[in-house]
Amino acid sequence: MPSDVYFSDMRTRSGRNLLDKVGTLFDKAGLGDLIEKGDFVAIKLHVGEPGNLAYLQPPIVRTIVQKVRARGGKPFLTDSNTLYAGQRSNAVDHMISAVRNGFGYATVDAPFIVADGLHGHDYIKVPVDGKRIKEARIGSAIAEADVLIALSHVKGHEGAGFGGAIKNIGMGSASRAGKQEQHSDIKPKVDTAKCKMCGRCVKWCPAGAINFAPGRPARIDSSKCIGCAECTISCLHEAIGVNWSSSELAGFQERMVEYALAVTKTKDGKCGFMNFVMNVSPDCDCAPWNDVPIVPNQGILASRDPVAIDQASVDLINAAPGLPGTRLSGAVNSNDKFGTIHKVDWRIQLVHGEEIGLGSTSYDLITIR
């Protein structure tokens, strides 16, 4: 049976701005109905790695916070610590990054709480009994919340092809150990012909697995590599990539999906999703920069089904005209834009999500003006 996905384009007019549309979509999708008075409501988002400007803007988040408060809920913003050695790998740096990117209490009217604690060790084990994962390690603040509202900036991703609602809650709710478990098959390799020996990848590697011999290209010690793959986006010269085998590709995405299922299992159906198909950058917001969008802004979607909302989001992107002068290069008319950029079969996450009961790839798109 198709799931309802509510959609509004980016057009605005006098008396009807984009924040108005966000509020209407929240209501039409019934996300407020998930909230009872006194519920702790986790608003799951990505506050952006400092230097990246493609993340969701704080006024949009504040609109959702106000909707939650109007229903008697107790909203808080949340995300878990990163596996890579950026500026969000511990709670102190993560909270500073959130404030610097505009997510202070005075702006969004809600506190930001790091879901898995100071060092990423604060998690709850959630039984899944999936194909890949038997027990997921979910950040405690997310697992213990009564309601989850996931706000996802849809963009490309070097491992999953794209990131939407599924990646936001599957990867984004996992503790650092949970993230490592999901990435366990990923082993990046260095293209020695492209390596400029700048050392940037060394600084980003949390495991100390990358080193240089004098005057020689970078080398990755596979015995130390934990598979976080962040070196692939930290390299400015595209000298590090992941040579995915079909089993590795499937394994990574399926583990991510099963973690997303674990999150929903903690909520007894009280999960809502909003996807923002705007500033569709080719890489994840974890990079401390963002490349130009690959398609024009398409709009905002809301649903209770994470698989359906992600399927609808990718369908909109693939149907949109590609923008020249972007990572699409000469393939602006591609009907598989993320596959063109990352050479990754992103459909795996949607198919597996449907197989395990996370949601449906079939949807009815209901347009709200």
Image: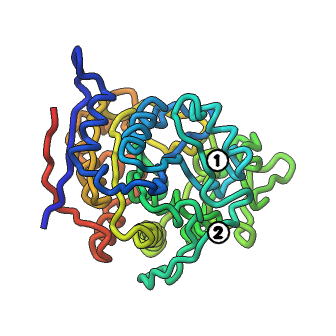
Q: Residue at x 37, y 57 (%)?
A: 36
Instruction: Residue 327: name its quadrant.
Output: top left
Q: Looking at the image, which is closer to me, 162 or 110?
A: 110
Q: List x then y, in percent, for residue 229.
A: 60, 57
Q: Secondary structure at mark 1?
A: loop
Apparent side of residue 303 relative to residue 252 in the rendered image (left or right): left
Q: Secondary structure at mark 2?
A: helix
Instruction: Residue 200: name its quadrant.
Output: top right
Residue identifier under label 1: 193
**Three-letter residue code for mark 1:** Ala
Q: List x then y, in percent, for residue 334.
A: 26, 43
Label drawn at residue 158: none
**Three-letter residue code for mark 2:** Ala
Q: Name above or below for residue 85 compared with residue 225.
A: above
Quadrant for the C terminus in the image:
top left
**Would residue 317 be visible to someone looking at this image?**
no
Residue identifier under label 2: 177
Question: First in sequence: mark 1 or mark 2?
Answer: 2
Q: Residue at x 79, y 50 (%)?
A: 216
Q: List x then y, in percent, for residue 146.
A: 45, 62
Q: Looking at the image, which is closer to me, 4 or 340?
A: 4
**Would residue 29 be visible to someone looking at this image?**
yes
Q: Looking at the image, which is closer to me, 147 or 2?
A: 147
Q: Name above or below for residue 1 compared with residue 346.
A: below
